[in-house]
Amino acid sequence: MSDGPRLYNTLSKRVEPLTPGPDGVIGIYVCGPTVYGPIHVGNARPYIVFSVLKRYLTRRGHAVRLVSNLTDINDKIYTAARAEGVASTALAERYGREYIADTDRLELGRPDAEPLVTEHLPEIIGLIERLIDRDLAYEAGGDVYFRVDRFPPYGRLSGR
């Protein structure tokens, strides 16, 4: 058995060695919070778990890059902003700052990058357009839906 780090692989349902990418860096991407209200256990947990994992791996001598996005555009943000009578951008900025301040109090360090969804809208729109062009997604009622039946690997992770 290897003395390197081993993690549970949800896809294979086995504990497996953790292997760095081609650049020698262990890359971790975590879907961060949607910033529409104060921090809660649901969005604090991933921050804590993956910050501790990064700290552990780093102390074991591994290079680690942790990325955790902040979702700053979302229907929940629009709803909360309307309820407070403020602009959705102002609400997201405020709760984004509060999230960072609250998690800083835990003294676990910051992720290496915390991109905002709004900073990447052109890329997101481009990906959605590619899915539609390839008939893997469709528009209905102002929304875009993924055609799960057109992508055979869909559901492998959940076992469906």
Image (cartoon, rainbow, N blue to C red):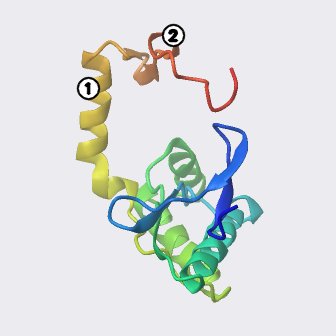
- Residue 25: x and y in percent read 41, 68
Look at the picture and state if 105 lies above or below 103.
below
- Outermost residue, front side: 1
Q: CA distance from mark 1 to mark 2?
A: 17 Å
Categorize mark 1 by other alpha carbons within 10 Å: few (<14), some (14-19), many (20+): few
Rendered-image quadrant of the C terminus: top right
**Image quadrant where residue 84 sits:** bottom right
Look at the picture and state if 143 lies above or below 78.
above
User: Is 127 left, or right, of 39 in this rendering?
Assistant: left
Residue in the picture at 59% in, 82% down: 60
Q: Which residue is mark 2?
A: 149
- Residue 147: x and y in percent read 46, 15
Q: Mark 1 vs mark 2: which is more N-terminal?
A: 1
Query: Which one is in front, 83 or 61?
Result: 61
Rendered-image quadrant of the N terminus: bottom right
Which circle marks residue 54 in the picture? none
Q: Which residue is mark 1?
A: 130
